[in-house]
Image (cartoon, grey):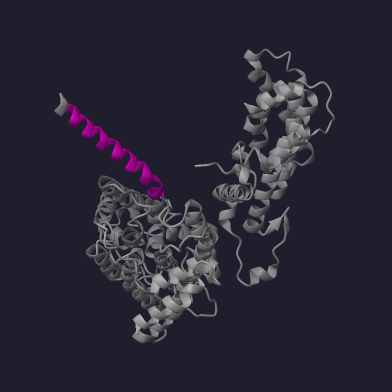
Amino acid sequence: MSETAEATAVAKEPKEPLFSAKNRRLLSDPLNDDNPITIQVLGICSALAITVQVKQAVVMSLSVLVVMIGANLIVSALRNLIPSRVRIIVQLVIVAALVILVDQVLKAYVYDVSKQLSVFVGLIITNCIIMGRLEAFALGNKLWPSFLDAIGNAAGYGWILIAVAFVRELFGSGKVWGFQVIPDSFYDFGYYNNGLMILPPMALITVGIIIWIQRSRNTKLIEEN
Amino acid sequence: MSNAIHKFLENNVKPNFDEGGKFEKFLPAYDALETFLFVPGHTTNGKGSHIRDGIDMKRTMIMVVLAMVPALLFGMWNTGYQHFLATGEAYTFMDAFLYGALKVLPLVVVSYAAGLGVEFIFAIINKHQVAEGFLVSGMLIPLCLPVEIPLWMVAAATIFAVIIGKEVFGGTGMNILNVALTARAFLFFAYPTWMSGDKVWIGGGMDESVAYADGSTGATILAQATEKSSGFVDASGAAYGDSFMASFLGMIPGSVGETSTLAIMIGAAILLITGIASWKIMFSGVLGAYVMGLLFNLWGANPFMEVPAHMHLVIGGFAFGIVFMATDPVSAAQTSTGKYIYGFLIGFLGIMIRVFNPAYPEGIMLAILFMNVMAPLIDHYVLEANIKRRQKRTMAVAA
């Protein structure tokens, strides 16, 4: 993949400022041009399942951020020690260990959200974005770029998740972060919450609309026929 | 007279919209209105070998809208009839019709305004002509909704259906789903309290100030069939004497345009005589529903399964869906064999969902949407089979 090619180039350069243009792009690309959800279409299951409320989406994004930073750093540190034949299972063990840690922390401090997220915290293990970054980036890069890459991708994942959750919670239950936003007077006038927003199909359509807006604004993404 | 108006438009108004004119941007909007009112002046030039037919897509669409008029008029009367039946007031034929017209016309106006508004905006942004497709969808949407549905919900659903059901796929002729049914499905899942129950189907039913006669029920026959085994009752609480006749004529609660199978059959006749709708889809659809009905009769595990097969053809939205929605030429199967399969499965699955799942009494809506999605697959296999057959034939000849 292109990332690995780019990666070897980075590794060979002797000294590089911490926030060189290349490193800054590791942070900014996943937010737009190379977004894990809208461009690479990875991690869609969780984007559909836990975007009913903003709070869940934020907690989920933070969990993924923590797991991703940890996994990218550990794999990057061990990258010359991991035999390439068993690398997938090693990566899985690392990610699984981190997910269990995150799950325990969530259960201890935000029990209610942890209950709502149910299996989806555990399923971070199978989140394609994390495995994808480990394979494509952390295995061939030093610690610092891997760290930035993790933050960039987790943020790219997170902002889509939170945007979708915002739309769904606002129209689906008239709330944001659990607080009533749409005033009672609207309901008195005959406004009703949109039940379809709560159902998974609407998450898919909302993601689709985000992709639509993104592609129409960003000409780089339009393929030639 | 109309010629003079057309000439005036061509000479004095149109230049403003042509290239370099004042309103150049709005040419699509102007063009849409002009061709809507007048048959476009495209003619074959001297050298052409094909004759251009004066009947363009707009004229075709108008025929479909005309075919829906009987159902619309009957729906207006029935809305008033159900209302007066429920309140127990005295009424004349005109009272009922006018009451219904006042209830139904706003739905039609809102549906057209919202849908055409979106179409015009997209036409201007994309610089193409306004497509005609919405002329039919705009009429179908109010006809397949309960009369008491709030107008803003109709507008929201129409906008959703036109954008998500049609424009994202490339506009008229490219939609994979029937637009009107997309709007109905949106409302069904988004605002279930306004799409089911026993009040929404009757004019004034959701207005609590209207007094109802005791013991009246406005539940549709489908809802009644899932709830209880004993015969069907009408809004005044009296049992439908001959429920087959009542359903066939359409004097029952239901969505605006779908109650009267008779009115729908008049529309079906218009569509079939003019050759606009496919008789293959209609025929195989009815057959599919009847076969499924018979199978359920044989099974007979619950009262709904024992509803006679011919009853299934006249109750609920089956007739309306199979005549006006399943035959949508864009979202239906395109191949001849494919049309039989497509129609049959719509009827078959529609009745199956209706009987098996009491939460979704309008199975026909879900069946048509499902088969819309499956239509390209059916076409693909029909084509493959045809290619294989012909290949075999040429091989046989060659050998």
- Residue B245, given in percent of the width and then of the height, sits at 26, 69
- Residue A95, given in percent of the width and then of the height, sits at 70, 26
Q: Is residue B116 visible?
A: no
Indicate the quadrant containing the C terminus of chain B: top left, top right, bottom left or bottom right: top left
Which quadrant would residue B99 be assigned to in this image?
bottom left
Taking the spot 40% from the left edge, 55% from the top edge, the residue there is B173
Q: Nearer the viewer, residue A78 or B9?
A: B9
Which quadrant would residue B209 be assigned to in this image?
bottom right
**Residue B371 sits inside the magenta stretch:** yes
Taking the spot 76% from the left edge, 32% from the top edge, the residue there is A22
Q: Nearer the viewer, residue A110 or A34?
A: A34
Left or right placement of residue B298 versus residue B352 in this view: left
Taking the spot 37% from the left edge, 48% from the top edge, the residue there is B371
Indicate the quadrant containing the N terminus of chain B: top left, top right, bottom left or bottom right: bottom left
- Residue B219, given in percent of the width and then of the height, sits at 42, 67
Q: Is residue B156 visible?
A: yes
Segment tinted magenta in the rendering: B370-396
- Residue B377, given in percent of the width and then of the height, sits at 37, 41
What secondary structure predominates along the stretch shown in magenta?
Answer: helix
